[in-house]
Image (spheres, coloured by chain):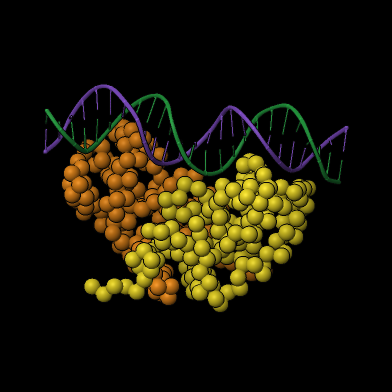
Chain colours: A orange, B yellow, C green, D purple
Amino acid sequence: MSTSNDELMASDPPVAPILAPLCAVFRRHLTAQSLRYTPERAEVLAAVMETDGLFEADALRDQLRTDGKDVSKATVYRTLRLLQDAGIIVPIMLLDAKQTHYQLAYGRDPYDLMVCMETGQINTFRSAAVAAIRDELVAEAGWKAVGHRFVIYGLSPEAGGGIPAPR
Amino acid sequence: MSTSNDELMASDPPVAPILAPLCAVFRRHLTAQSLRYTPERAEVLAAVMETDGLFEADALRDQLRTDGKDVSKATVYRTLRLLQDAGIIVPIMLLDAKQTHYQLAYGRDPYDLMVCMETGQINTFRSAAVAAIRDELVAEAGWKAVGHRFVIYGLSPEAGGGIPAPR
DNA sequence: GTGCGTGCAAAGACTTTGCACGTAC
DNA sequence: GTACGTGCAAAGTCTTTGCACGCAC
């Protein structure tokens, strides 16, 4: 359902290279609180890593099942909570979505999104300009920034967007 | 629960001045589809206009009750849907919120938000820079922008944000 | 042996829908 | 008189929680 657009991410390392340490990050987080790195938790994390960085809880569970790993709904949700606590993923609510979407974050800002309102296609990208504006706005208000969510709703070329038809 | 920050909106007309035409907009939208402008719908719209531009369905219903107007849950939700269709409000999902929040939109971009992760305080603002970046990013990708949601998560001065404590 | 983890089922929270009755055109 | 609107209650979704059993340290 969601797709990444390599074009837009060209200047940014793709998700894969940063995944290797995630296991370790997660394990450290768990250990620090006397929690255990169980097979189920490892499988959920692995499934998260197989996504393109944006996913939903039930889709993740389906993927686990497809891979022959059957983890209960409750454990999936509980593990996603732990991954949030560890800063590995962040929840994101998309317009009109009933389900919570999650993004890989791993200690840095999550990707910004461009969602096609017709096809549901999702582009992920990251823009230094967005972060710069965020910091500026927050400073103006006397706040401190922790993070942000930037979702652009629009029409992809396939859905009638594309090169703006002159009118 | 939510508050507007006048400071941040100083250069932008407050919400009030644009409300007068909303009734008309809504009525036109309803008429165009052979729907009726009923007392309940008028009351829901009035309650929406009394908000600071960001609200939840059940809070709206509570406000209606306080005002002596008792509109059923179902009608509130159904009317909010109509208001969305009319382009008067847009739904917005905030991080970790279970309820859908709505914003007054009225044919233009909704306010961007700054949410305090400690106190839940919400500042609304609008930034030309955000819109400019959005349009630029969309153009780059060959898409067409319809709208966006920009939510900054941070800490308000009261919550330990404020002038960044030197460390 | 204590305590954390899992699965299942039930509970919760928000939103939508079915239905009968009422009201506007 | 037909069609739209409302309220109530029930149904639906997604997510969380209670509980008993099992496994890790």
Q: Quadrant of residue A70?
A: top left
Residue B68: x %, y % from top left? 67, 48
Residue B40: x %, y % from top left? 71, 47
What quarter of the picture does the C terminus of chain A occupy?
A: bottom right
Q: Is residue A14 left or right of residue B67?
A: left
Q: Residue at x 68, y 47 (%)?
A: B69
Q: Residue at x 26, y 57 (%)?
A: A18
* Nearer to us in this view, A115 or B77: B77
Q: Residue at x 62, y 67 (%)?
A: B15
Check the image and report above or below for B161 versus A78.
below
Could you tell me if residue B109 is visible in this image?
A: yes
- Residue found at the very far bottom of the displayed protein: B11
Q: How many marks?
A: 0
Q: Is residue A33 left or right of residue B17?
A: left
Check the image and report above or below for B131 versus C21.
below
Residue A160: x %, y % from top left? 59, 58
Q: Is residue A151 left or right of residue C3?
A: right
Q: Quadrant of residue B155?
A: bottom left
Could you tell me if residue A10 is visible in this image?
A: no
Residue D5: x %, y % from top left? 73, 43
Q: Is residue D1 left or right of residue B112?
A: right
Q: Residue at x 47, y 68 (%)?
A: B137
* Nearer to us in this view, D1 or B24: B24
